[in-house]
Image: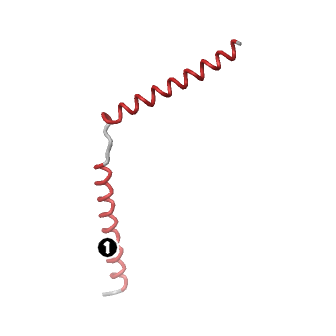
Amino acid sequence: MSSTENNGRVKLAVIARDIDYIKKAIDDIRKNYVTQQEFKPVRLIVYGFAAIVLTAVVGAVIALVLK
């Protein structure tokens, strides 16, 4: 067996190992996935809070301009 063949086999083994790690990582991501239904209440709370803050800022700017 030549050195080139051996290097090729080692590279192939490394690639196969990396693919296994990627498959495991994808499985972990799928287990910890958050669906839109689960995320919707969080989104509504954050959007509501942002709307309140934006309304307060705009109100303060208008109050300064009219003063």
Location of residue 56 with respect to 28 vertically, above or below:
above
Tell me: 24 left or right of 57: left
Name the quarter where the N terminus is drawn.
bottom left
Out of 10 and 57, give the one closest to the viewer: 57
How many discs mark residues in the rendered view?
1
In percent of width and height, residue 43 lies at 40, 32
**Residue most toward the bottom?**
1
Residue named by callout 1 = 13
Tell me: 24 left or right of 47: left
In percent of width and height, residue 30 lies at 29, 49
Location of residue 39 with respect to 5 vertically, above or below:
above
- Element type where label 1 sits in the image: helix
Residue at 35%, 71% in the rendered image:
14
10 Å crowding of disc 1: few (<14), some (14-19), many (20+): few
In percent of width and height, residue 23 lies at 29, 59
Tell me: 62 left or right of 38: right
**Residue most toward the right?**
67
Location of residue 54 with respect to 30 vertically, above or below:
above
Name the quarter where the C terminus is drawn.
top right
